[in-house]
Amino acid sequence: MTKNEFLDGLRRALNGQVPPPTVSQNLEYYRSYIATEEYKGRSEEEILEELGDPRLIARTIIDAGGQPSKSAGDGYDPYNGYQQYEAEADSSPDPQQKSGSSFHSYRLSKGWIFAIVFSVLFLFFAVLYFVFKAAFKLLFSFHGIWFWAILLVIIFNLTKRRQ
């Protein structure tokens, strides 16, 4: 079973049994739970095996009056959100997370990292191109008179030192 099959099965089992906002709230809860566990390094199969049958979860939610089951052990409160996850994020030793922040971690995909690096390099080389283009234009203006004048001064100074 995949994550999408699990969520689809849960949605079908809850539709008509609880109000639509409760259905979407529970679907978002389990979608977030699965994503969080995957971020922690667990496989999708392992997470779904732990959660079990979506119809059983739906029955538990219906019996509990629309709240997600505590079988996932998630500290979910329909009025205050995912308190346990926020507490874990605040106490985690991860240096990338700032203290007092909620459990929102922004990870860039390899494609975005490549795009950023490519853009920075492109801008760097574009600036170099225009700087050197302007320098050479100034240097070689008047048919290269400046270039030859500077070259003659350098040669003159080099020969003068040897004598």
Image (tube, rainbow, N blue to C red):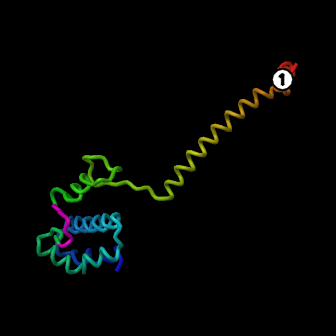
Residue 84 shown left or right of residue 43 in the figure: left
Label 1: which secondary element: helix
Q: How crowded is mark 1: few (under 14 residues within 10 Å), some or many (20 or more)?
A: few
Judge from the rendering whether residue 69 lies leftward or rightward of residue 158; answer left or right.
Answer: left
- Which residue corresponds to the image point at 75% horizontal and 26% vertical from the top-left? 138
> How far from the left and from the top, in percent, is residue 61?
16, 73
Amino acid type at image mark 1: Leu
Q: Does the magenta stretch include residue 73?
A: yes
Q: What span is in magenta?
A: 71-77
What is the quadrant of the C terminus in the image?
top right
Name which residue lies at 29% across and 64% down.
32
The residue at the point 72 percent across, 30 percent down is: 135
Q: In this view, does 17 lie above or below 113?
A: below
Vertical placement of residue 69 versus 138, above or below: below
Residue furthest to the left:
64
Find residue 22 and report its image quarter: bottom left
Residue 145's place in the image compared with 112, above or below, is above
The residue that disc 1 covers is: 158
